[in-house]
Amino acid sequence: MNYDIKIKGNKNDDGSIEFDRLSSLADTTKEIATKALMLQLRGYSDVKPDAKIKKALEIRLESLTGNKKDGTSMTIDCDHFSETIKRVQLDFFKPKEQLLQATPMSLVIQSFHNALSDNRSETDIDKPLLKSLLKFKKNFISNEEVFYLANRGTVPELELTKEDFKKISLLEDSIPEPTNEIVNGKLDEIKVSKGKLGLQTTQGIVTLIAKNDTTLNNILQFVGKEITISGLAHYKANGQLSFIEVVDYSEPKTSDLYFSRKPNAMNAEQQLLFQIKEGKGKNSLGALESLMGLMKDDISEEEFNEMLKDSHR
């Protein structure tokens, strides 16, 4: 499948491209494709692909042309995943048909569309992938430049300017950094798919992700049993837990019952303020009444009034 990458808008562009810049463009594009694929396959983008998956991520430069009037144009070629990963035996997941019809470059284009959309799904993007999208900004050498990425009709054309990266940066900043957490619960035998495991806690299912198959295989012996997990908790933009990346695990002790709740990046008061600002409560008055009930015994009246002001900013 052929794709076009066009660079226009720089008044000094004569249609050529310097080697270092070409290398940067190749590296950042490949990194985005890799993380976008691993997000689809393993539910988390910052997972190292094996040799067979790396082969499926090959992106080839077929031609490079340009002139002062039209800028720089590259023709890129890559294979559909149906021709590459479909034949790979994957132990814990089965690629969806939609993914099999995609290519490395279509995942790059779609990742930018998802990051810039106001209607994105939380499963379409994560913090490591957003960080990789932001690295693409270094390929611009002027504020006037525009990058066009397209595959001649199948996927909507992507038009990128330096200004677009402000929105991507805000989205990346809105997702809390991972925290070290310990969580205890029963490993759910039903919730096992594409490298994910479900841990039943007192507050519901917590998704666990193992970055390598050895860890995943070892944890599976605890299916239907209690287990204590130590790992990195990854969050959504609203501060709610997305999943826990497993670092270590053990048979639980009595004291581990303390850790049988879901971790949150925000406390109750912060979550409520977030909901008010996002307009997700039934109404601001009801939300503020809940806030008052939560906090009236914990903070001074002056501090409470200051938080009320903040909720309307």
Image (tube, helix red, strand yellow):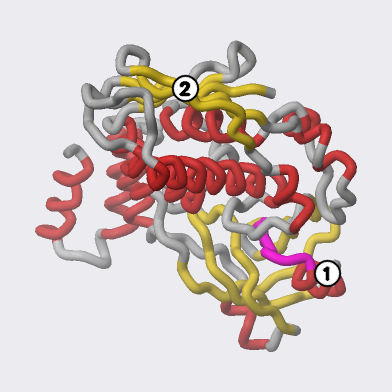
Q: Which quadrant of the view contains residue 215?
A: bottom right
Compared with residue 185, is residue 57 higher up or lower down, i.e. above or below? above
Residue plotted at (74% across, 76% down): 227
User: Does residue 286 show up?
Assistant: no
Q: Name the residue located 81 percent from the left edge and 39 percent from the top edge.
A: 84
Hey, which quadrant is residue 81 in on the image?
top right
**Quadrant placement of the C terminus:** top left
Left or right: where 182 falls relative to 238: right
Say whether residue 210 is magenta: yes
The residue closer to the viewer here, 23 or 276, is 23
The answer to whether one can see residue 142 in this image is yes
Q: Callout 1, which amino acid? A: Asn
User: Where residue 210 sits in the image (x, y, percent)?
Assistant: 69, 65
Residues shaded magenta: 205-213
Q: Nearer the viewer, residue 74 or 211?
A: 74
Which residue lies at the image location 80% right of the left edge and 55% below the top edge? 192
Q: Residues within 10 Å of mark 2 (few under 14, many from 20)?
A: some
Label 1 or label 2, whichever lies nearer to me, is 2
In the rendered image, residue 119, in percent from the top left (x then y), is placed at: 48, 26
* x and y, in percent, of residue 19 in the image: 42, 43
Magenta region includes residue 161 = no
Under circle 1, the secondary element is helix
* Three-letter residue code for mark 2: Thr
Horizontal side of 200 relative to 92 (left or right) equals left
* Residue under pointer 1: 217
| Residue at x-position 71% and y-position 63% | 199
Q: Mark 2 — residue?
A: 65
